[in-house]
Image (cartoon, rainbow, N blue to C red):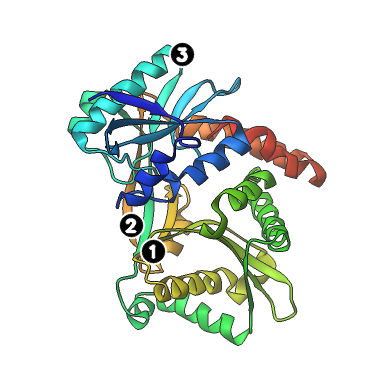
Amino acid sequence: MVIARIDPGSDRRWQTFVENRPDAGIFHTSAWLEALRQTYGYEPVVYAATDRNGLVNGVPFCLIHSRLTGRRLVSLPFSDHCQPLASPEELHVLLAAVKDDATENNCKYVETRPLTPYESGITTAAELTQSHDAVIHRLELHRSRDDVFRGFQKDCIRRKISRSEREQLRYEEGRSEELLQKFYRLLLLTRRRHQLPPQPLLWFRNLIGCLGEKLKIRVASSKDGIPIASIITLSFKDVVTYKYGCSDPRFNALGGMVFLIWRTVQEALNEGAAELDLGRSDHHTPGLIAFKDHWGARRYRLTYYTYPARSGGPANAGLFMAAGKRLVAAIPDPLFTRLGGLLYRHVG
């Protein structure tokens, strides 16, 4: 099997392959990869085997250059997961080519983030080591609306849905600059509260520009018109992905986040979606894990792998977050929004 290295931005064969591959998701798309390139300067590359009909398989990576965290190949940065679109036998050959390129480019390491853990044969043959362990929640939607609703935890979810209805919360969705600004103001509140640097506004603008109708900003406002919660969801094929969420803590009792996710679930059901991907949760966030459990979503193990062996999560994320917390605590508000643009490209 001869391995080709293709540019997913200019070679339309990749997007055609992704559209026709049943296990491909939003993070495989050329649009997602282009947003990563535009925002952070990463170099997307797909390792794939081809025949006369097009691509046979493929795994997308981004080549990251950073003076702070080193050069590396990651599949994929700022993506909860990226399942290799290849059989185990094919994957072994693809990863061998990736490792060769990593050596040639003086990369510190290669990282893959599959949706399902690799079989032991793959990790042994490719000399991969587990570098990060998390969980992902997936809510199955092959049921009636009533069946899905009955799966919600009574006190934490169903009662909050009722409360949000009594409060007459207002709902908006779209991709306008006005909605983006509402989302981003709430994001800054949330990141400041958690003492974490915010993602750059440019990232969200590029996601909107690249993904188009596959992305929705959803905003909940009080009956007085005050934005209280917002989420960003992504849609591809029959899967809806909850990617970002934020809120104003002064209004948490109104149930804005629950209101938005419930609206998303109902819309997904109406459109025939098979699944709501509630995203990755790290083990040090038990509250977030419990919140997703309460929706009746199934919890799965999410494991990242590196070559050569390393630990500590994506791009020394622990060190980055510790440094970020120190900066967040010290800098004034006008500089807070610039911090993410300075730091995030180094930790994809």
Percent coordinates x, y for residue 146 in the rendering: 36, 83
Amino acid beneath label 3: Asn
Amino acid beneath label 2: Arg
Q: Residues within 10 Å of mark 1 (few under 14, many from 20)?
A: some
Relative to residue 227, is residue 215 drawn left or right? left
Q: Residue furthest bottom?
A: 166
Percent coordinates x, y for residue 197 in the rendering: 65, 42
Do the residues under discs 2 and 3 have CB atoms within 8 angstroms?
A: no
Amino acid beneath label 1: Asp
Q: Which residue is mark 2?
A: 299
> Which circle's residue, 1 or 3, is located before the other in the chain?
3
Do the residues under discs 1 and 2 have CB atoms within 8 angstroms?
A: yes
> Which circle's residue, 1 or 2, is located before the other in the chain?
1
Q: Residues within 10 Å of mark 3 (few under 14, many from 20)?
A: few
* Residue 293: mark: 1
* Residue 106: mark: 3
Q: Residues within 10 Å of mark 2 (few under 14, many from 20)?
A: some
Relative to residue 329, is residue 44 drawn left or right? left
Say which element carries label 1.
helix
State the residue in front, 265 or 250: 265
